[in-house]
Amino acid sequence: MALPSTVIVIDASASVEALRRAASLLEDGSGTVKLQGVCTLRSVSGRITCEVPDPLADQHRCAEELTVLLENGRRALADSALAAHLPDRPLEWRVVAT
């Protein structure tokens, strides 16, 4: 039976220790990092999957709206303190239903 993975939530007030712990989870694939209000990050096959929640998943969205959700997620992650601590891996972005 697999052990449950660790989940850590990072927000604007996260300590350097919490940021390092989040980066460590992504580095070794032992957990999930939730960047509060932005996305959920998981280490998958040598890359980091960034899942942006769609708050209106039950409604039809055009491609442009999905692109905007992804771009907002990218910008928010890039502007966050977590960005400087991420492992050097490709980021794969997707929109997910909440």
Image (tube, helix red, strand yellow):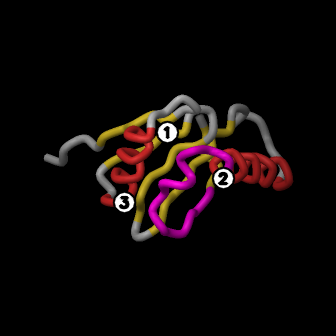
Towards the viewer: 22 or 51: 22
Classify 83 as above or below 45. Answer: above
Between label 3 and label 1, give the one nearer the viewer.
3
Percent x, y of residue 57? 69, 37
The amino acid at mark 1 is: Lys
Percent x, y of residue 74? 69, 53
Q: Are marks 3 and 1 in contact (CB under 8 Å)?
A: no
How crowded pointer 1 is (Cα within 10 Å; few <14, some 14-19, many 20+) is rated as some
Give the spatial CA distance, label 3 vs label 2: 18 Å
The amino acid at mark 2 is: Ala
The amino acid at mark 3 is: Glu
SS for callout 3: helix
Percent x, y of residue 76? 69, 45
Classify 92 as above or below 16. Answer: below
Residue corresponding to mark 2: 78
Towards the viewer: 63 or 52: 52
Left or right: where 41 falls relative to 55: left
Left or right: where 64 falls relative to 39: right
How crowded pointer 3 is (Cα within 10 Å; few <14, some 14-19, many 20+) is rated as some
In the image, which disc is placed on residue 27?
A: 3
Classify 40 as above or below 9. Answer: below
Counting residues from the start of the chain, the first of labels 3 and 2 encountered is: 3
Residue corresponding to mark 1: 34
Left or right: where 52 falls relative to 87: right
Report the label total: 3
Counting residues from the start of the chain, the first of labels 3 and 1 encountered is: 3
Q: Residue at x 36, y 60 (%)?
A: 27
SS for callout 1: strand
Tell whether position 34 is magenta: no
What range is drawn magenta here?
79-93
Where is residue 56, by image quadrant? top right
